[in-house]
Amino acid sequence: MDTLLLKPWTPSSWQALPALQQPSYRDPQALEAAVAALGRLPPIVVSWEVDALKTQLAEAQRGQRFILQGGDCAESFEDCMSEPVVRRLKILLQMSLVLLHGLKVPITRIGRMAGQYAKPRSADTETRDGVTLPCYRGDLVNRPGFTFEERDPDPTLLLRGYERAALTLNFVRSLVDGGFADLHHPEYWDLDFFGHSPNVDAYRGIVDSIGDSLHFLEAITGKGVDDSYRAAFYASHEGLVLHYEQAQTRHIARRNAWYNLSTHMPWIGLRTAQLDGAHVEYFRGIANPIGVKVGAAMDDAWLQELVQVLNPHHEPGRLTLIHRFGADHIADKLPRMVDAVRRTGVPVLWVADPMHGNTETTAQGYKTRRFDKVLREVEQAFQVHEECGSRLGGVHLELTGEDVTECTGGARNLSDEDLSRAYRSTVDPRLNAEQALEVALLVARHQARGRRSAKR
């Protein structure tokens, strides 16, 4: 580890190391031109927003805040329209309202959006009817249609991704600044199809309770509660395509540090977390709070060296470990991981990803996730951390505000046969808005029960 830390770092030093899950561009000069053009464009986020998020993540480590990180498995350029963005923001606001009511701590909302345009793949190629082409790696890299022209990695898509990310985040900021996230009016967040849900009464009860509490507090103090009018919102994405991340990495003189200003919080996926790999090299040099997906494939030595390389100064809020095991394995695997990290002395924030370890394929060929397993993994995550003397500080979910049928179960008990009705994801299955809100309700109830038990 000491040798790694002594190596000089630059935004491009990753290029000297093995880089997994990267597109194979046929024209190096076109790639160089696209990266140079991207590097001249204004940043999508600013450094003080990044620092503010890091402060909030440090608070979550101390149990003073809870993190809700959620959004699409992979964004589409075509979905850069007002209604899909509004629906995603709505469901995250609804969930945070439920969590705020149940957990009694501030909620930080981090969207998997405004940059989640690339996805790792298990194979480099795909074969159909005897024809083999590069696999679809997300709109940042190539196109989903099955022709050579569509699947050929196109460096100009890096610029298109920047444009779509900037448009998305600017629209979200306008909504938030304009009062869309005002806790005095959560009725604005209702989703059209949610009225039939068996959880609708519970949600409306929470809305009324928070509204009554705000009005009471403002009545007795004679002034408004400032934080209730504008909810901060942060963006995150997997920092997978390193040329894209490098191009938006800037040196901030007042901090004497390098920031990735394409997003507030990039993360490293489980498939690219190799200690001698390009992704760890790039991430160790940026000042952003960063996440790492971790799972059963990591042994103690790998995990321990990883956290020390990525957070060598033991900075609170710097490093989030997003664990993904699956409901059948978390109870056996997570305690060892918590103990291994504790022995390093490196502070981390633990967040549960109950989605990826529970992915399966139906007989009809649909990738799906069983809602009961998602819930079971979240519940076990709280329990295991408590038993280990640790703390679960957040959840990380793939979800959408749309009325999709991609995960089975939930309040409407979707079956395998229901998946074909509205299966729209091109990559991984997502919770629909109803299922996502149900997760938030159950997390809030779990914590409320825990507080009542502690008082007895």
Image (cartoon, grey):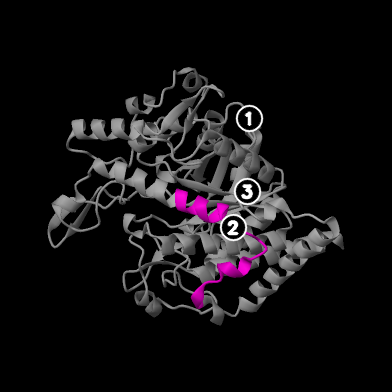
Please name whichever residue, 302 or 247, is drawn nearer the observer in this view of the structure: 247
Mark 2 or mark 3, which is nearer to you? 2
The kind of residue on which mark 3 rests is: Pro
Label 1 amino acid? His
Residue 203 on image: x %, y %: 64, 72
Q: Camera-side residue: 218 or 343?
A: 218
In this rendering, would 362 be left or right of 257? left
Decide whether residue 184 is among the magenta residues.
Answer: yes
- Could you tell me residue 361's position as x and y percent? 37, 66
**Distance of label 1 from label 3 (alpha carbons):** 21 Å
Q: Is residue 444 left or right of residue 37?
A: right
Mark number displayed over residue 335: 3
In the rendered image, which quarter contains the C terminus?
bottom right
> Tags 2 and 1 in contact by the CB under 8 Å rule?
no
Is residue 34 rendered to the left or right of residue 4?
left
Q: Which mark is residue 314?
A: 1
* Mark sitting earlier along the chain (1/3): 1
Residue 330 spot, x, y in % from top left: 57, 55
Residue 324 visible in this rendered orientation of the protein: no
Mark 2 to mark 3 CA distance (whole Å) = 43 Å
Q: Which of the 4 image quadrants contains residue 100?
A: bottom right
Q: Range of the magenta residues?
A: 170-193
Query: Circle 2 — which element?
Result: loop
Depicted 41 relative to depicted 129: above or below: above
Quarter of the image for residue 102 reads: bottom right
The residue carrying mark 2 is: 179
The relative height of residue 254 versus residue 155 in the rendered view (above or below) is above
Q: Work out whether mark 2 precedes mark 1 in sequence or the reverse, and give the earlier one.
A: 2
Residue 378 is covered by the magenta coloring: no
